[in-house]
Image (tube, rainbow, N blue to C red):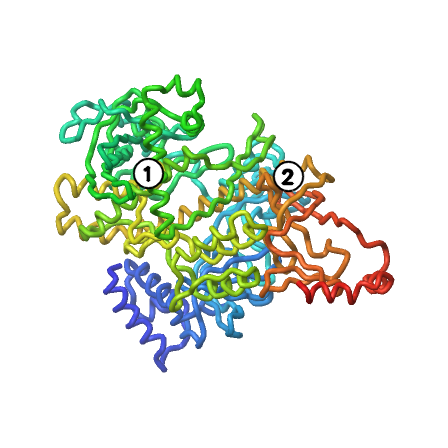
């Protein structure tokens, strides 16, 4: 429905519902009363849902619509395995706590209406009760089936979905206990009644190879196979570039061009050319012209938007585009002609782009390089240098330019969180055989630097042309979180300058530089990261706080990210014909949806990738139960402390396992404190742990602290009295 028409109808319907004559009605009753034609049924539903989302009306337990009471908000319910939950309100930093007895049968991700019953203020979390469920967001879940004589039930994998699902015998589809299944929910139940469903797919037994990851794939509703119409469309795409398509393109096939990627990468969507003339570096970033093959509005385009991004799991990639494109005609493979969209930049010795040109090109990659190979060349490895001798000057110039670009970003305040990523190696049956930290080397940083400058250059160009575009934005941190960070780092003797309700990224960058190599570095780095917001795609150019730049977009990966593909289309249309008013209006209309969908699919992919990592790490640590390791405290909550090992595996020390005292979490200082001994544990502190247990289903690992001097049997008070430690510990705490 048109936005203006929707607002008009909302006004009319709200006026009716809030009138003195109105008596609460169900949807069908309201249709009859308002004499809404059958063909406009969807319009009325949209109006009512929009009024509920605005918090103006609510729906009661009998399904009747009423005017909302005061303090009613609409948001997304986030379940918790302990029974309580939270409601996230769009545009608000602080969520609302929902006690277990006030969830009204809401399930994780449902859109709900919540009434605030305690708005404590002073930074304390608000509390509310759910008064209505606007929209059920989950209709299928994945879980483990258990069979009884006359029925079955499914324990869901997602622990935020806190209720088991009852499965009538006739809908079990022959599943047996231990099967991983996909369940279609047929009845959402209520506060006191379990949801009900039917099994629609059996993934396999819980112990079968690959079933564990497939359960996560299905749980996040990640697409596996491409629909038949999409594959039929792809069959019509040529295997090699037709020379007729070179017309109107800049031909750079005779220029030395390289791709630099991981050893096992198959979708090579970016290539580099680089030369130096006097003090000017001539950098070319060449991106596969995916939009030449994925036409706007085609079934392939619709499927790509639906997916939003490629998903990189430990044992597989779920691509945004079929392999014929991503590994074939759209991959810049060495020795073959390929179409590209290129950004040529002239960069001076200070890292400033003094001139640039964006154009369509035809390229032929000279050599396919790996990060390891380039690193060896930069380290003067004899064999590697001999193999790639003609290209060595280019790689040395790359290092030179990348250093300049990085220094320029550093000077303006760009923040670099260098936490190690995980590399998990599996055997042929999907079992983890090694987990280690995957560190970036100079070669990976070179490519990052070149992609960043290309993304900035393209974003700035199209911002000033005032053409509808998709930007990658990162908002300023929440002032309250930054104030808390400032108070906390004061304990360590550090300060950050906070302006009027905001902070410059340079302040955080300087802080991270000052703490480099100190014992508190992991602690403060993590808290700084947590104080920042999540980057997203927007149609407004709101700048990128973390990179400290006014202009940023994603231009460099159209094979695996839809926003890049979308802006390639805009750029090419502008280059070829100029942007007409009609087409400008078209993009203004569709881009908000593209940005929103892309952001949502990116979050889904991130969560699925994290869950698969957690699963494989838990499986890996099973073989180390009973063994001891050193790690650092990476997180503290009221129920325990997270400890991260050098190989990136994280486990939890439950507060109940700390038996030498009664411990409580002090939120102000981010520390766990013993009530009697005053012993403290804080973020970043090194500790020794023993692996006690693993729950692969919950993807959790239990650690226990290995005490250097364990307290003998007896009560805490007896131990304190016998050893005369009360005063000593109090003095020590005061001294600290």
Position of residue 197 relative to residue 615, above or below, is below
**Between 699 and 441, which is closer to the camera in this rendering?**
441
**In the shown orientation, is residue 206 left or right of residue 628?**
left
Q: First in sequence: mark 2 or mark 1?
A: 2
Residue 463, position as x, y percentages in the image: 22, 51
Residue 133 visible somewhere in the drawing: no
Mark 1 burial class by Cα count in 10 Å: few <14, some 14-19, many 20+: many
Q: CA distance from mark 2 to mark 1?
A: 50 Å
Residue position for label 2 = 178
**Between 7 and 148, which is closer to the camera in this rendering?**
7
Quadrant in the picture for residue 701:
top right
Residue 219, position as x, y percentages in the image: 51, 44
Position of residue 139 relative to residue 616, above or below, is below
**In the shown orientation, is residue 580 left or right of residue 488?**
left
Position of residue 350 relative to residue 641, above or below, is above
Give the SS element for disc 2.
Answer: loop
Q: Residue furthest bottom?
A: 20
- Residue at image position (18%, 23%) is 243
Residue position for label 1 = 450
């Amino acid at each position: 429905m048109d936005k203006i028409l929707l607002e008009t109808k909302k006004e009319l319907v709200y006026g009716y519902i809030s009138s003195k004559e109105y008596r609460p009605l169900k949807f069908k009753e309201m249709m009859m009363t308002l004499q809404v034609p059958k063909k406009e049924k969807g319009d009325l539903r949209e109006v009512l849902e929009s009024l509920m989302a605005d918090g103006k009306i609510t729906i009661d337990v009998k399904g009747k619509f009423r005017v909302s009471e005061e303090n009613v908000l609409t948001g997304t319910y986030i379940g918790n395995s302990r029974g309580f939950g939270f409601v996230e309100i769009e545009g608000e930093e602080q969520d609302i706590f929902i006690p277990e007895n006030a969830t009204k049968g809401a399930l994780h991700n449902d859109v709900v209406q919540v009434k605030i019953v305690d708005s404590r203020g002073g930074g304390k979390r608000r509390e509310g009760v759910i008064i209505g469920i606007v929209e059920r967001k989950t209709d299928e879940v994945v879980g483990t089936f258990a069979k009884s004589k006359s029925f079955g039930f499914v324990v869901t994998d997602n622990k935020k979905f806190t209720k088991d699902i009852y499965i009538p015998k006739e809908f079990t589809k022959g599943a047996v206990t231990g099967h991983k299944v996909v369940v279609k929910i047929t009845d959402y139940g209520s506060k006191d009644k379990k949801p009900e469903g039917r099994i629609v797919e059996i993934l396999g037994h819980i112990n079968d190879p690959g079933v564990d990851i497939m359960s996560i794939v299905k749980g996040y509703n990640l697409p596996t196979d491409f629909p038949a119409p999409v594959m039929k469309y792809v069959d019509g795409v040529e295997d090699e570039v037709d020379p007729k398509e070179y017309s109107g393109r800049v031909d750079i096939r005779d220029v030395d061009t390289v791709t630099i990627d991981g050893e096992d990468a198959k979708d090579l969507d970016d290539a580099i050319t680089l030369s130096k003339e006097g003090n000017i570096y001539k950098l070319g970033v060449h991106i596969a012209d995916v939009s030449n093959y994925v036409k706007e509005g085609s079934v392939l385009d619709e499927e790509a938007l639906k997916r939003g991004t490629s998903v990189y799991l430990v044992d597989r990639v779920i691509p945004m585009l079929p392999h014929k494109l991503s590994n074939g005609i759209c991959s810049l493979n060495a020795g073959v002609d390929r179409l590209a969209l290129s950004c040529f930049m002239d960069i001076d010795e200070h890292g400033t782009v003094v001139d640039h040109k964006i154009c369509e090109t035809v390229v032929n990659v000279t050599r396919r390089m790996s990060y390891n190979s380039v690193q060896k060349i930069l380290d003067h490895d004899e064999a590697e240098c001999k193999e790639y001798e003609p290209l060595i000057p280019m790689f040395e110039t790359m290092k030179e330019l990348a250093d300049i670009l990085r220094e320029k970003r550093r000077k303006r305040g760009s923040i670099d969180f260098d936490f190690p990523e995980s590399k998990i190696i599996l055997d042929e049956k999907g079992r983890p055989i090694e987990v280690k930290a995957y560190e970036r080397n100079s070669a990976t940083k070179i490519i990052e630097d070149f992609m960043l400058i290309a993304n900035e250059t393209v974003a700035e160009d199209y911002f000033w042309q005032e053409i509808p575009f998709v930007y990658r934005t990162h908002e300023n941190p929440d002032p309250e979180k930054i104030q808390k960070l400032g108070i906390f780092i004061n304990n360590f003797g550090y300060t950050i300058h906070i302006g009027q309700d905001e902070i410059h990224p340079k302040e955080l960058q300087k802080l991270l530089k000052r703490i480099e190599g100190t014992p508190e570095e992991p602690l403060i780095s993590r808290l700084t990261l947590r104080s920042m917001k999540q980057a997203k795609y927007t149609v407004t150019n709101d700048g990128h706080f973390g990179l400290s730049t006014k202009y940023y977009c994603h231009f460099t990966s159209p094979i695996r990210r839809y926003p890049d593909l979308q802006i390639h289309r805009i750029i090419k249309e502008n280059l070829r014909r100029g942007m007409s008013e009609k087409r400008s209006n078209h993009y203004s209309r569709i881009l908000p949806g593209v940005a929103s969908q892309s952001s949502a699919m990116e979050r889904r992919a991130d969560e699925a990738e994290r869950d698969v990592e957690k699963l494989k790490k838990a499986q890996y640590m099973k073989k180390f139960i009973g063994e001891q390791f050193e790690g650092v405290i990476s997180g503290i909550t009221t129920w325990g402390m997270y400890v991260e090992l050098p190989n990136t595996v994280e486990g939890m020390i439950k507060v109940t396992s700390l038996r030498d005292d009664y411990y409580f979490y002090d939120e102000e200082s981010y520390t766990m404190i013993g009530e009697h001994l005053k012993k403290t544990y804080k973020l970043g502190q090194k500790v020794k742990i023993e692996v006690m247990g693993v729950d692969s289903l919950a993807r959790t690992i239990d650690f226990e602290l290995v005490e250097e001097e364990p307290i003998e049997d007896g009560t805490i008070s007896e131990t304190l009295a016998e050893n005369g430690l009360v005063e000593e510990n109090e003095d020590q705490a005061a001294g600290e």
